[in-house]
Amino acid sequence: MPQLYTEISCFFKGHNSELEEELDIVFISNDEDQATFDHYFKEMPWKASPFSDRDRAITLCENFHV
């Protein structure tokens, strides 16, 4: 599992009750296929942009230099 995901997940789980009304974390996948997306997303406690919305993911990656 990627390091950043692990760090965000630990933080979110530790502060979920405090932040749930004020913060939404949205997973924007850079995975190459639906199966890989599904594998990572099933472990996540937050929302996700649909894997099929590749154009949005590409635009966000470009805009935020990810």
Image (tube, grey):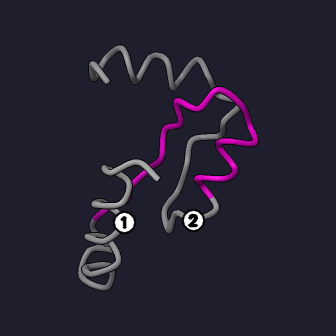
Q: Hey, what amino acid is under mark 2? A: Glu
Task: Judge by depth and name the residue closer to the eye, 22 or 5.
Answer: 5
On the picture, is 21 further left or further right than 32?
left
Q: Is residue 15 above or below residue 63?
A: below
Q: How many labels, in total?
A: 2
- Is there CB contact under 8 Å for labels 1 and 2? yes
> Residue 18: which numbered mark, if any?
none
Decide whether residue 12 is among the magenta residues.
Answer: no
* Residue under label 1: 9
Residue 4's spot in the image, x, y percent? 31, 49
Provide the residue span drawn in magenta. 23-41
Residue 46's spot in the image, x, y percent? 48, 62
- The 10 Å Cα crowd at callout 2, few under 14, some 14 to 19, many 20 or more, is few
Give the quarter of the image for residue 12: bottom left
At horizontal 45% and vertical 16% (from top left) the residue drawn is 59
Q: Is residue 41 above or below residue 18?
A: above
Decide whether residue 25 is among the magenta residues.
Answer: yes
At horizontal 24% and vertical 82% (from top left) the residue drawn is 18
Give the quarter of the image for residue 34: top right
Q: CA distance from mark 1 to mark 2?
A: 9 Å
Give the quarter of the image for residue 19: bottom left
* Residue under label 2: 43
Outermost residue, bottom side: 17
Residue 7's spot in the image, x, y percent? 28, 60
Identify the element where label 2 is drawn.
loop
Q: Hey, what amino acid is under mark 1? A: Ser
At horizontal 49% and vertical 18% (from top left) the residue drawn is 58
Residue 9's spot in the image, x, y percent? 36, 65
Q: Quadrant of the C terminus?
A: top left
Outermost residue, right side: 35
Identify the element where label 1 is drawn.
helix
